[in-house]
Amino acid sequence: MDSESEMDSTEQLALGSTDTLANGNKIDQEAAKRLAKRLYYLDGFKRSDVARHMGKNNDFSKMVAEEYLRFFDFTGLSLDHALRAFLKEFALMGETQERERVLIHFSHRYHQCNPDTISAEDGIHTLTCAIMLLNTDLHGHNIGKRMSCSDFITNLEGLNDGKDFPKDLLKVLYSSIKNEKLQWTINEEELRKSLSELADERTNPSLKTMKRISSGSNPFLDIMQDPTAATYKHGFLVRKVHADSDGKKTPRGRRGWKTFYGVLKGMILYLQKDAYKSDKQLSEEDLKNAISIHHSLAVRASDYGKKPNVFYLKTADWRVFLLQAPSSDLMQSWITRINLVSAMFSAPPFPAAIGSQKKFSRPLLPTAVTRLSLEEQIKAHDARLKAMTTDLAEHHSFPPDKKAKGKELEEYKQKEEYLEFEEMRFCTYVSLLRAKLKAGTDDLDKFDAALFDTAENEGNGLKKSHSSPSLNLEQPVVAIRIKRNTSERRNNRHPASAKHKL
């Protein structure tokens, strides 16, 4: 059955519009009830269809969500049990904002069923998001050090309408998630269909061949391998793994240089051992070596003197790779392409549901492709740049006390490094996207040429330094910080940058 064939005009309007339906004549309560009932009983719908009908930013979708939640009675259930029951009935898919709206509807319904459990509805929503991120932290593979129960409690201090959540409640929730991870009800075939937000399987049958590169237990953070994605660059690269997730130093046995044929396809940099063929099926080893470049930054390794034409690639989970290109021009081209693709397609970060002034935690960065236009993407990145600049200035205004303990100093430095890196990343993104908008071409070779013409003719475009932050002479250099082993420090004594050491 076609899931849209039996919908009336009001139901179909909710699917393709984000406009607010303020006109009472357009709001149809009965249509919302019918659609909600069909969604709940999966009458003509798949589990992966449900969230998108509840997550739109219009009045009809809000009514559908309210009617859908009426099928759930959470009375007497703990928040984690209610959330598990909710997530078993459908797949929480879609863009960040859509998932956020669905969880708001869940929180509202839970508060209706249990008005005396947690007084504030906002507190329930905060705790709901905290549970989901805790699930990722405890059961994912790319978050680094696992959160302890005391960390979980500390991170949520003051977030219950200005008060603390009961410690006993948080301990129970922590134990529940630690002992049994949240399950997303969706099978592999549905997942392949649902995560393709840029194309419709009905008009592009090749999407059935999609594979997933797992990044953990949370489907929001998995890498989607799309065989129909555009190829932005390919050529030989020599790779060295320098740091694992969260910047942890890679063990010596895995740090050696290896030669690959790099293919930047979509949001993934594939590193293949065999010769490149556009129709070649990727091996399991190729998929294992693949690097997702969402929210990443490529920077010329000006401090690395053992090999020429080397650049750093720092990923969203703070892994660091050293990559060597055959020539200086090719190195610069790789840096530009990686940063441009990341700037164009990286989706907005997840809301910081867990966090407080007492403990810093980096936000989760989704692998999903943004659906914003180029102009909207520029505005979004520019807003993040301004926020990072403001946060960094505020951070520097309140340095730790001279008598502060080592842990407090370390957390201060971690947040400082994060804010400096994010400021540099978004500055690079904004500069590149503005240059692309000005160039008015989708031909990246022509864009490269226009971009670098300004090395000789300043004022006619973008300076070469904007695509490679370590070359930027207009602001203090904030380079990717890495920790070198003893032999590298002994053989490479380079002066630090004007403000920040590498």
Image (tube, grey):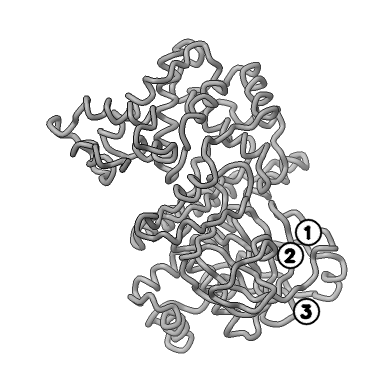
- The answer to whether 450 is drawn above or below residue 245 in the figure is below
Q: What is the quadrant of the C terminus in the image?
A: bottom right
**Real-space Cα separation, disc 1 to disc 3, in angstroms:** 19 Å
Which mark's residue is nearer the viewer, 1 or 3?
1
> In the image, 440: left or right of 81?
left
SS label for mark 2: strand
At label 1, the amino acid type is Thr
Rendered-image quadrant of the N terminus: top left
Callout 3: few (<14), some (14-19), or many (20+) C-alpha neighbours within 10 Å? Answer: few
Q: Position of residue 390 (x, y in %)?
A: 49, 50
Q: Nearer the viewer, residue 158 or 395?
A: 158
Whether the residues at callouts 2 and 1 have beta carbons within 8 Å, the answer is: yes
Question: Nearer the N terminus, badge 1 or badge 3?
Answer: 1
Q: Position of residue 39 (x, y in %)?
A: 36, 31
- Mark 2 crowd level (few <14, some 14–19, many ≥20, 10 Å Cα): many
**Above or below: residue 39 compared with residue 488:** above
Q: Is residue 354 above or below residue 235?
A: above
Which residue in the structure is indicated by mark 2?
241
Residue drawn at the location 80% of the way across and 70% of the way down: 256
* Image quadrant assignment for residue 202: bottom left
Q: Indicate the secondary structure of the residue bearing disc 3.
A: loop
Which is more N-terminal, label 3 or label 2? 2
> Percent position (x, y) of residue 318?
65, 55
Pointer 1 local density, CA inside 10 Å: few below 14, some 14–19, many at least 20 = some
| Residue 497 appears in the rendering | yes
Residue for badge 3: 306
| Label disc, if present, on residue 250 of the rendered structure | 1
Look at label 2 and name its amino acid. Answer: Val
Front-most of 407 and 118?
118
The local secondary structure at tag 1 comes to loop
Residue at x 86% of width, y 72% of height: 490
